[in-house]
């Protein structure tokens, strides 16, 4: 796709391909990341709208790149965990309609440390629980 930033990975001079396979690439921004330091994305080279449209080869290459990215990040950062995930569809938080897997090292001194992907769901569950107890 002509205007898709992930279909033309070399168009953005701040974006660097760290690793690639035949079907996918692991990329990071070169500029200093003030939030989510060390984070990157695994993207299929083919324009796949979301995770559900990946081919078997893209799934296999995504796994290979995820393990390479982990080893790469483990060597460079003193982090204590990871958040790894797909956002799918606008309502699911996907802002660019090209499949991309977020690979984010997490640090104990960041504001949302320990919250994880289910943090917001747990917040809602706790609010509902508190309301039903008050009734």
Image (cartoon, rainbow, N blue to C red):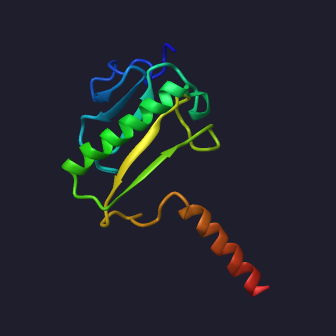
Q: Is residue 40 left or right of residue 124?
A: left
Q: Residue furthest left?
A: 76
Look at 41% across and 34% down and name the residue there: 42
135 to 89, vertically: above or below: below
Rendering coords of residue 6 (x, y %) = 44, 24
The residue at the point 43 percent across, 37 percent down is: 63
Q: Is residue 50 above or below residue 115?
A: above
Q: Nearer the viewer, residue 13 or 113?
A: 113
Q: Residue at x 33, y 51 (%)?
A: 35
Question: Where residue 32 sits: x, y (%)?
Answer: 24, 42
- In the rendered image, which quarter contains the C terminus? bottom right
Q: Position of residue 37 (x, y in %)?
A: 29, 49
Name of the residue lying farthest toward the top? 2
Instruction: Using the rendered view, name the quadrant where residue 10 is placed.
Output: top left
Residue at screen point 38% across, 20% down = 22
Q: Between residue 46 and residue 32, name the one nearer to us.
A: 46
Left or right: 18, with 101 as reference point: left
Give the residue at the far right of this rendering. 135
Q: Residue furthest bottom?
A: 134
């Amino acid at each position: 796709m002509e205007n898709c930033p992930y279909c033309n990975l070399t168009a953005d001079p701040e974006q660097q391909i760290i690793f690639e396979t035949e079907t996918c690439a692991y990329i990071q921004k070169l500029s200093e990341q003030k939030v989510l330091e060390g984070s990157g994305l695994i993207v299929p080279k083919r324009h796949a709208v979301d995770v559900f449209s990946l081919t078997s080869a893209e799934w296999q290459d995504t796994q290979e790149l995820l393990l390479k990215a982990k080893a790469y990040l483990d060597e460079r950062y003193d982090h204590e965990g990871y958040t790894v995930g797909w956002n799918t569809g606008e309502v699911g938080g996907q802002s660019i309609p090209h499949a991309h897997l977020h690979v984010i090292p997490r640090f104990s001194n960041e504001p949302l440390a320990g919250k994880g992907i289910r943090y917001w769901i747990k917040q809602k569950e706790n609010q509902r629980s508190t309301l039903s107890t008050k009734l």
